[in-house]
Image (cartoon, helix red, strand yellow):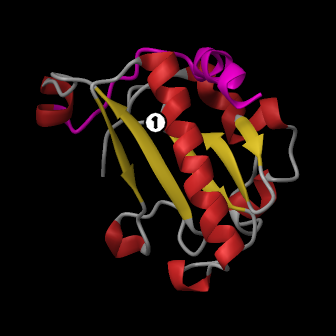
Amino acid sequence: MVDRIYAPWRSKYFSLEKGKGCLFCEIQKEEDEKVGILKRGENWFIILNSFPYTSGHVMVVAKRHIDRLAELTEEEANELITLLKLCEKAIDGAYKPDGINIGVNRGSSAGAGIVGHLHFHMVPRWNGDTNFMTTLADTRVVSEALEDSYKKLLPYFA
């Protein structure tokens, strides 16, 4: 369990009640800016992570409720790569990181926070971006408000 520093300005991101179905299926019904959706494709959407590891942490999420890469159609697979490339360009342009982690966690034992709905993370990284908070307190410090991240990234997805 990771401890979090309380940030009341983030409370509006918890508007969806737990237990009302799949978060990623439900979030697609919301207004883009309200939930942090940066782009909607044919089969995927790009969204800010509401619990980012670093500023600029985005996810590419399947529109349909699927669990495995093996379930992707060729069209979905091709669009996924196109959108991951777009995210890479956006993160590089907006944040100029030293690197980017790209990953998928399939299943709760693999670390998936939302199980059963395929999504990919893109996390900007900088040399020296780990600190004592993560090491000693199992806590992450994110220095940018989600609204600011959204405004910074949105022009790259227009």
Q: Which residues are magenta?
A: 137-158
- Residue 59, percent from left and from top: 56, 47
The reply to whether the magenta stretch includes residue 54 is no
Q: Quadrant of the C terminus?
A: top right
At numbered mark 1, what does the secondary structure look like: helix, strand or loop? loop
Q: Residue at x 76, y 49 (%)?
A: 16
Which residue is tagged 1?
52
Q: Is residue 110 visible?
A: yes
Q: What percent of the width, then of the height, locates residue 49?
A: 55, 40
Residue 30 or 74: which is nearer the viewer? 74
Q: Position of residue 105 (x, y in %)?
A: 41, 65
Q: Residues within 10 Å of mark 1 (few under 14, many from 20)?
A: some
Q: At 66% from the left edge and 45% from the top edge, which residue is drawn?
A: 46
Task: Name above or below for residue 1 compared with residue 157.
Answer: below
Closer to us: 71 or 26: 71
Residue 124's spot in the image, x, y percent? 38, 32
The answer to if 139 sits in the magenta stretch is: yes
Quarter of the image for residue 80 reads bottom right
Q: Is residue 147 above or below residue 113?
A: above
Q: Nearer the viewer, residue 89 or 116?
A: 89
Vertical relation: 143 (above or below) 92 = above
